[in-house]
Amino acid sequence: MKILFVRAFTQILKRADKFRKNPLQHDSAATKKWRSESGQSVILISMVLMSFIMFFGFAINTGLLITAKISVQAAADAAAYAGAATQARQLNAISYLNYDMRRQFKKFLYRYNFMGSAASMGGGTPPTSINMNKTVDPTHYGYPKKWYSGSSSSDLQTTAIKVPVICIPMTGSGGGNDYCQQLNTPNSTKMAALWFPNKGLTTVTQAMLSTMGYIESSLDEQCKKYSNINLFVLMEWLFRGNLDPTSLENTLGTMASAIKDASERQQAVQKIDTLVNGLGLYPRNLFNYMRITTLQQFLNDPPSTVTQDQVKSLESNQSAADSHERTIQAFKSVLVNLNNDVLDHSKVSMMELQPQNQINIELVEASFNAYVQYMQDAPVDPNADTRCQSNVVPFQVNNAPVGVNKTSSNTIYYAVKVKATAKLLFLPISDGIELEAFASAKPFGSRIGPTGSNGVGNLTEADFVETVKPDIPPGLSPTGSDCAGLAGTQCKLPNLHITDGDTFYSSTFLDALYHIGGVQNTTGKGLTLSYQGMDNAEAPEPKEIGHYNIIPPPKSDMGGEYIPYAVDQNSSIYRFYAPIFTGTADVNAQITTMLGKVFSNAVSGTNNFFNIDTFSLKTDLLAQMTSYASAALKQGSTSENGETETFAALELPMVPHSSNPPKPIQPSPQSFWLTRPEQVLSSWSPPHLQGAPNPTPRFGYSVKFVAMQNVLQGSSGPDEDQEKVEH
C-alpha cells in the first residue's frame, strides 16, 4: 500500500511539471469552456445595477429621513406654539377678569361716593366754600351735614363728616327733601310745650300738642323706614347675588310704604331698582375669582405623555377636554404637520416637559367701613331735644374680594418632546426608525395685574383703602368719631388712587363726575341721576396704564389693534371662554368653598349695630349665588350681560353701556379717565417698531419660541427682552 501511494504521488508531480512548462498543450474541452469571455458583462451590469439601486435607495431613504426629521421638528414647533398660545389666551382671560374685579370695586366706589351721597349738602355742583363742603385738606370732599345741638333754630350746626354717608331721598324729582341734608330735627312738641306755661294750657292747646306729638311719632317711624332703605341699598351694592326682579320689587314695595303718596312711592321703587341693578360687589367678584381659579387649574394642568388614541379619549369627555385643552391643541398641531404616509400617526407620541405648577394666584381682599345714615329701631324719647335722630353708622365690610395677585416669579412656558416612527424603503427593520424633536415657546408681553420688580404681585389691601377719621357730631353715632369698636376695619375707608395725587374722594374728581353725571340737587330737591358718570368713573385711569391688561374698544380709528368682533363692532360686552368650573362639579359645593374663604370668621350670633348676623349673611348669599348659578348662568338670557357657566361676559371699560342711548365717554380736562384706545394698549411691540412713525402697540399676550436651554436654566420673567410701548 505504501509503494502504491508513492507511485501515484510521483505521477502527479510529473504532470504538474509538464503543465507548468507548457500549459496550452494540456487544455481539455472543459478548460476551453472555462476560458470563454462570453457572459462576463452580465456580472458587471448586475454589480453596477446593484450598486445603483443601493445608492438610489440610500439617497431616497436619506431624503425621506431628512424630510421626516424636519417634519417632526416642525410638528414639535407647532405643538409648542399651540400650547403656549393656549396659555396666552388663558392668561389674557385671567387678566381681563382681574381688571373687571377692579372695575367692580370702582363701580362700588362710584355708588358709595356719588350716588349714595349725592343728596347730602352740596350733593349737586358744590359751592365754593371749603368750610361747608370740603375738609381742611382740599384733596378730599367733606360730605357736610346739618344737625341740631339743642332745641332752637339757633342751635343748627354744620359739620363736614369727611366720609361718604349713604342716604337715599324717597321723593320724586320734583319734591323737596331735607332728610338727607341733616341728621335730626328739633322736637317741635317739646318746643311748643315750652311756649305755654303748664297753668295756661287750654283744651285747644293740649289737643294741638297731642296732634304735634302724633306727627312727630309718625315722622320718627318714617325716618326709621328711610333708614332701612339706606341700609338695604348698601347691602344690595355689596351682596346682591340674584337678579330676580319680582322678589326685589316686592321687597322695595314694602320698604317704600313709608311714602304715602302712591305716585311718589312708585317713583321711589323705580329709583331704588335702578340704583341697585346688577350683582353686588361680593358675588360679582367671587364669580370672577371662580373663573380665575379654573383658568389657573388649566395652566397648572400636570404635564403628560399622550398618543393619538389617548387624545381621542380626552376629546370624547367634555370635562377632560376642557381641562386638557392645551394638550389636545398641541397634539393636534403635531398630527397636522406629519405626513401619515411617512410617519405613522398611530405611533406618534408627545411628552410635555414644562413644570406642573407654573402660576400661583391669590385673592386680594379689603376690609373697610361704609357709612349709612341710620335711625335705630329703639323707642324714641319724646322729651328729647331732637327727633328723627339719624346716626352716621359704619357697616363693617370684611374681606371684600377686589383683585388677584400672581404670587410666583416662575416663567410660564410650554415645552414638548415629540416622537414619531419613519417608514423608509428597503429597510430591513420592519418597525421603522424612531425620530424625536424638542421645542419650547412661551406667552409674553403682558401681565395679569400690577407686579413688583421681581415679578411677584404686590397688590395689598392698602391699595384699596385709606385711613380717614370721620367727624361725627357727638351723641349721634354709637361708635363715636374715633372708630372705636371697629376691629379689623378701624378707620379704613374704601378708596383708589386714580392719578399720582388724586383719589375717588378728591374734590376735583367728584366735581367732574357731578358735571358729567348730571346730578341736580342743589336746592334739596329729590335726586335725579344719570348713569353717564358711572361710565366715566369706571373708565381706565392713568394709574392703571402699564399695570393692567385693559381691553380696548371693539373698533378703533387708530392703527393699533382692537378686539376683532366678527359681527357687532358696536358691542359694549366682551365674551370669552372662562368656565366657572368644569365637568359636573357641585355648584353649591363650589360656592360654599369660595364663601368659606371670604367669611372665614362668620359665626352665628355675631351681631353689629344693624343686628345683622354675619353667619346668616353668608347663608343668604350662598342661597342667592347658588340660585343664580343653577338658573341664570345655565340659561344665559337672564344672567348679567348674558354670561354663562362657560363664557364670561364683561362690560368693555372704554365703551358706554349704562346710558340709553349710549353717550360717548366724555374726556376729562384733568385726565382722570382715558377715552382713546392708544392710551391703554399697555402691551408690547417688537423693538424694531419702537420709535417708528406709526408704531403698532398690542394688547394682551403674544407667543414666541424660546430655546430649551433658556427655559431649563430658568430665564427671567416674560418681558425680559421687550420694551414697553409709550403712551
Image (cartoon, rainbow, N blue to C red):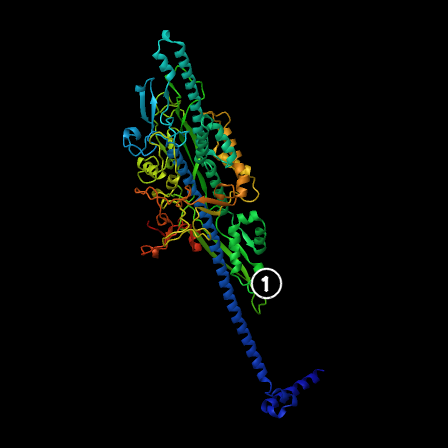
Decide: is 265 above or below 24: above
> Looking at this view, is 369 or 595 the one in front?
369
From the viewer's perspective, is 125 left or right of 108? left
> Looking at this view, is 157 or 720 the one in front?
157
Disc 1 residue type? Answer: Asp
Residue 193: % across, % down = 37, 12
Please tell me whether mark 1 sits on a helix, a strand or a loop: loop
> Looking at this view, is 571 or 707 the one in front?
571
Decide: is 341 above or below 14: above
> Looking at this view, is 527 or 106 the one in front?
527
Residue 261: % across, % down = 45, 27
Residue 75: % across, % down = 50, 59
Q: Name the residue located 53 percent from the left edge and 69 percent from the top edge.
A: 61
Residue 541: % across, % down = 35, 42
Q: Name the residue located 56 percent from the left edge and 55 percent from the top edge.
A: 307
Packing grade of label 1 (10 A; few <14, some 14-19, many >=20) is: few
Residue indicated by mark 1? 431
